[in-house]
Amino acid sequence: MSECGVSNSIKAAPTAAWWRGRPASVVLMLCAALALMGTALYAQQTERAKEVGKKLMCVCGCGQVLVYCNHVGCAYSSGELKELDAHVAHGDSDDGILSAFVGEYGLTVLSEPPASGFNWFAWIMPVLAPLLALLLIWHLVRRWRQRAALASAGAPQISAEFLARAHHESAPDDDA
Amino acid sequence: MDIFGSFALILALLAAVYAFGAGIAGIITRRPLLTKSARQAGMAVFVLITLAVGALEYFFFTDNFTIAYVAEHSNRALPAFYKFAALWSGQEGSLLFWSWLLSIYAFLALFLNRKKHPELMPYVGVVVAGVQTFFLTLNTFVATPFRVLAASDGAGLMHLARLSEGSGLNPLLQYPEMVIHPPMLYLGYTGFTIPFAFALAALLGRYPGEKWIHITRRWTMVAWGFQSVGILLGAHWAYSVLAFSGYWSWDPVENASLLPWITGTAFLHSVMMQEKRGMMKVWNVWLVFTTFMLSILGTFLTRSGVVSSVHAFAQSGIGPWFIAFLGIILAVCLAAWWKNRDYLRSDNQLDSLVSRESSFLFNNLILLAACFAILWGTLFPVFSEWITGSKISVGPPFYNKVNIPIALFLLLLTGIGPLLAWRKTSFDALKRNFAWPLAGGLAAGVGAAVSGFRDIYALMCLILSVFVVLTIGSEFFRGARVIARRDGLNLLSSVVELTTRNTRRYGGYVVHLGMVLIFIGIAGTPFNKDIQKEMGPGDRMSVGPYTILCQNFDQVSNGNYQSERATLEVFRNGRSEMMLYPERRFFLASQVTETMVAIQSSPLRDLYVVYAGRSQDDGRPVIHAYINPLVKWIWFGGIVVVFGTILALLPNRRTPLLQHAPEPAWRDAIAPATSVGAAIGAASARGPSRVASAVGGVIRRMSSDE
């Protein structure tokens, strides 16, 4: 999903005539392209490595969880995946693997903020804010009901007969 | 021609500034001629920006690589419809596109209301012109798309430079949905300007009555509909192009599009409380303000580089402009609200916690909680870096943990809310309305649990989805049954009759149904499976019920790209079912390689195959296959949401019953009053029968559309 507008720098790209005049260059370019297509892929991976990999990010800046990063030519994810498999093969615990990655790449390699220090706020605020809003609503509702009680005390009395007639006259309501 | 485009933009800016200044002067001096000229200047902005957009498109189609923006975002071999879409592929062009869409909205709002609401429209014109002035200032002085390329000669003189070929369009954008998705999303973002303008105008001008809220609601629904389509098309684009087998990755740019959509959704619900009961006026005004401000905030996040995103525009110096604009908007909104807060006093109070009003309150609370959680997650890395000095990531696991419970609660309210009555719902009514839907939901849950459904969130989603579908179904059924009995129609015709008589209510139910389908689609995610394998011709691999046979790899090329393509035959139960052709394309102009995913979609599951590249170890091609259950439900649900939105925007069909309803008696009685108590008080002076008529009238007014 995107608003996509990744800017490209200006390059003097070759024209069609240029391509036609240089068949050898075209072949070389094609080979280079195919070689580029083949870079940086690492066939993986055990179920446990996949699970732990979901707790890690690719550090190339793509914002993808490590095991979902599928960028062509990503210079980071294949290295990270290899490292992850090595840790799993070595029998390291999940926490041990995550600590090793944090030690190497920093906290940014974790796919969610650790629940410690200032980063604890990342977790607590989405819970705290609705609770505060709920308190506010409770306060508002109480005030409204108090006002409603005061207003109804001064309103004319309506008999059951009138109310029945009023309901009879009213149409069914109409909102989703 | 570049001068023509720049000149048109400068004139558009001048026209917008005039519309703003003359509009204010017209309001202060009350001179109709000034007001009229301001309105016409506002409409002229549309014509002038259209000329500028036409000029830029002309440069794209004539491959004029003297213009820097064209050279950066196009090339000669680019297909024509991508040249058209290149307009919004970069910072400068997309800002121009934004201004153009806003000018279309402004033109429509000013033209359609030119003979209506003479007290309100001058304010609306001023607010819209103010927003247009900001964006046209950016188009003209900060990010102009008509910058030409120049080179200096030996003597230091500058000359126009023309490149023989452009750098090409970003390959990720060379996909049919990218021709539709950004315009839809921008129509959503820019569309929220119009309800904002009406709300602010009504507040500034202390416009009497509730008419402005009806207008605001309709414009919001239009913008909301476009935003919904834009978000869904974007999700489909991500699914089909980005090759991570998902449709949503909680990227900051994705989140930015979701935030105003959520507050817009909250407004479309809470506005009913103001229309029916004169409540929540302050809340509604601030929801409209917030929705607009979140649109601007989203634009700021996308374009400033303050949060990192693969989708975002390159980092630029445009951020401070948006921050300043946001500051101005916030200050104006606060000042307008503070000065006129008595104008927003509620007419009524909440009578019971078990009522339609309270369900809207909770609905708004939950929607805003989701909005806050997403905004908090998006901005938290920035806060964390400021305070602790170290970067952290807030990835999909965070958003899923926080938002899934919120979303499920929202789904529950979607089922409960419409069945509660205004003011108060009795226990008997609760039992009558909810017994069968609840039993149906629980039965579905038990059935799913017995058949091995173990994921707790997916199970809850299933139970709630069945519950909501049954409540919606019961609403249609009960209404249609009454019509069928009275008019002798069959049930299907009665459903159509019912819906066309109250499009807003039943269109809303259709939107809810679409959302349920989307939820069901999302609930399939925990059951995804995947396998990645090196494959040569003749190799096989199995995923879900499918076996994939690799037949061969070949190469395809055209003027735009060269591609390596896998030919895969897919078997199910030993029978050949389909051929799939996942590709990797090397785009010549931009020198970038991208994947083209092959997807076989069915209502139960998608087979999603990526040609992932070649193995580092032995250079063999690697194929990554995924089974993604129920994804098609999301796209189908999206279509249903759009259909429901269009339905809700249609006018009601007049019925003989309503045309001949004996209205004058109660209408006279309640005309000067806005609350039940006041209406009854006014009518009591005319005798007991008038009191009953007045109560009936108030109830009817609460339950009828406008």
Image (cartoon, rainbow, N blue to C red):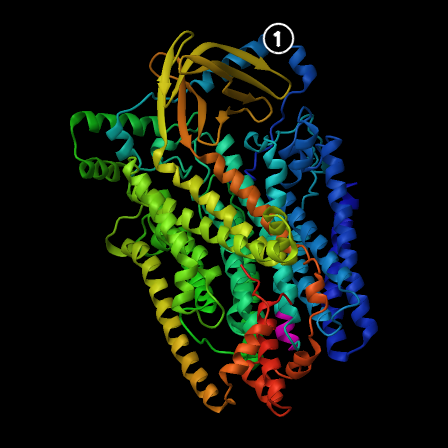
Instruction: Identify the subunit bearing mark 1.
Output: A
The answer to whether B532 appears left or right of B665 in the picture is left
Q: Identify which residue is drawn at 55% across, 55% down.
A: B295
Q: How many marks?
A: 1
Q: Residue at the spot x=40%, y=23% of the render?
A: B625
Residue B680 locus on image (x, y percent): 57, 85
The local secondary structure at tag 1 comes to helix
**Label 1 Cα neighbours within 10 Å, binned few <14 / some 14-19 / many ≥20:** few
Horizontal side, residue B299 vs residue B202: left or right: left
Residue B105: where, in percent of width, then height?
A: 69, 55
User: Residue B259: where, in percent of width, then height?
Assistant: 49, 54
Can see residue B399? no
Residue on which disc 1 sits? A23
Vertical side of B235 occupied by B114: above or below: below
Q: Quadrant of residue B703?
A: bottom right
Please determine whether, in this image, residue B199 is positioned above or below residue B606.
below
Residue B85, image x, y percentages: 65, 36
Q: Is-magenta flag for residue A151?
A: no
In the displayed orientation, state which residue is furthest to the right.
Answer: B33
The range drawn in magenta is B200-206
Whether residue B312 is visible, yes or no, is yes
The answer to whether residue B201 is magenta is yes
Of residues B572 and B600, which is closer to you in this image? B572
| Residue situated in front as seen by the camera: A172 or B313 | A172
In the image, what residue type sits under mark 1? Answer: Pro
Identify the residue at image location x=77%, y=60%: B111
Q: In the image shown, does B580 or B686 lie closer to the viewer?
A: B686
Q: Main secondary structure of the magenta part?
A: helix
Q: Quadrant of residue B164?
A: top right
B525 vs B584: above or below: below
